[in-house]
Amino acid sequence: MFHWRTRYRIGDKVIYIQDKATPSPGPRAKNIYPCPAGDLYVYQVEKYWVVKDVLPDGTLVLATRRGKERHVPSDDRRLRKASWWERLTRAHRFPELSTAQAVTRAA
């Protein structure tokens, strides 16, 4: 069976589904479920990141809105490219990736 593999490039806007568990979910929380003990909620939040670098092993270096870096495998099922509509309507949620931040690799 053929598996589609998304190609990511530096500067691509991506959305990552982050699993969280806290006493009070925020307004962007989705798929909210109470924990069995009842003191926490488990839920998911969409994180809006930008590809900062693509490593040779296929790992993506993603820039967060607060300036942190996350390393995520390019085939992670919780990661996807933002659609044109999401890039348009949620542009303010993606971090700005300046040319100074972007890492360029020599071939």
Image (spheres, rainbow, N blue to C red):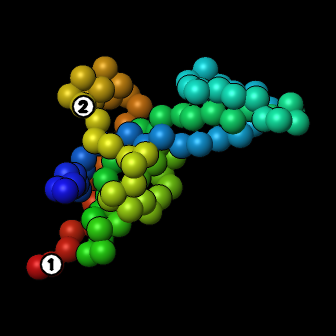
Q: Quadrant of residue 93?
A: top left
Q: Quadrant of residue 95?
A: top left
Location of residue 81 with respect to 7 vertically, above or below: above
Quadrant of the rendering where the C terminus is positioned: bottom left
Q: Nearer the viewer, residue 102 or 38?
A: 38
- Percent position (x, y) of residue 54? 27, 65
**Residue at the spot x=20%, y=74% of the render?**
105
Location of residue 90 with respect to 49 vertically, above or below: above
Q: Is residue 57 left or right of residue 68?
A: left
For residue 106, the mark is: 1
- Percent position (x, y) of residue 17? 48, 40
Residue named by callout 2: 83
Q: Residue furthest front?
A: 1
**Residue at the spot x=35%, y=66% of the render?**
59
**Residue at the spot x=63%, y=33% of the render?**
43
Q: Nearer the viewer, residue 4 or 55?
A: 4
Q: Is residue 81 left or right of residue 33?
A: left
Q: Is residue 45 left or right of residue 20?
A: left
SS type, badge 2 = loop
